[in-house]
Amino acid sequence: MTRTKRFVIAGGGRVGKQTAENLAEQGHEVLLIESDDERVEALSDAYIGPVIHGDATRPSILKQADLAEADAIAALTDEPGANLAICMEAQQYAPSIRTIARAETGTDQEYGEVVDATLLPEYLGGDHAADILTGEDIRTLVYPIADLDIIEVSVAPSAPVAGRRLDEIALPSGSLLISTADRTGLAGADTVLEPDERYILAVETDVVDEVLDLMRG
């Protein structure tokens, strides 16, 4: 089972709210910070997690989030400059916290000295932000479609399936290995699951943990 983590989301707009919902659906704890009155009311009504009403760039507000107890913070407001400032300030209070900032331009490496990860415009979705925040070696490609997830995950060298052919592996009922991450061809019975290679799978929600145990050990 994936360890329950605690996340702080600064910015409760579309991206922030969707990110928080995705993390909560994965069983994680989420705290949101939002300054807009209407958004605060909508977030409170959604019962995703506790909501702090205030400006996350203000130290007095950010300190209320108890960052030392959080695994990561995502600054997902509409202001890129504010997002970077929030992440930098968060690291002052909790040096080990993982940070992600929503940006408008550039590359995901441009702000590498300031934040751990950058959410660029082409990836402005809560699913992608949630994957970055959890820090897992897994990427959700479609999230969610009813009770089915399409995931991309790396095979750990020590995993039970590493180095074995697909027809030698008993994948759980409700899961299907589709292809390698480069999508050069569909997986077949003779496909060997190479260590450190990434694969795409279709997995029913109730067997995701079981599949990840096989792929990651």
Image: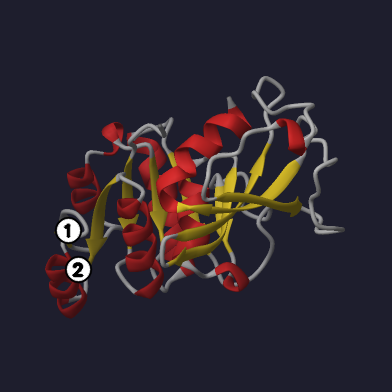
Task: Kindly identify the amino acid type of the residue bearing the numbered disc 1.
Answer: Val
Earlier in the chain: of badge 2 and badge 1, it is 2
Q: Looking at the image, is 96 positioned above or below residue 55? A: above
Q: Residue at x 73, y 43 (%)?
A: 198
Task: Kindly identify the amino acid type of the residue bearing the numbered disc 2.
Answer: Leu
Q: Is residue 34 left or right of residue 3?
A: left
What secondary structure is marked by label 2? Answer: helix
Q: Residues within 10 Å of mark 1 (few under 14, many from 20)?
A: many
Where the N terminus falls, by quadrant?
Answer: top left
Q: Nearer the viewer, residue 163 or 54?
A: 163
The quadrant holding residue 18 is bottom left
Q: Position of residue 182 (x, y in %)?
A: 81, 55
Question: Disc 2 marks which residue?
Answer: 43
Question: Disc 1 marks which residue?
Answer: 51
Q: Position of residue 162 (x, y in %)?
A: 73, 27
Q: Residue at x 41, y 39 (%)?
A: 91
Q: Are marks 2 and 1 in contact (CB under 8 Å)?
A: yes
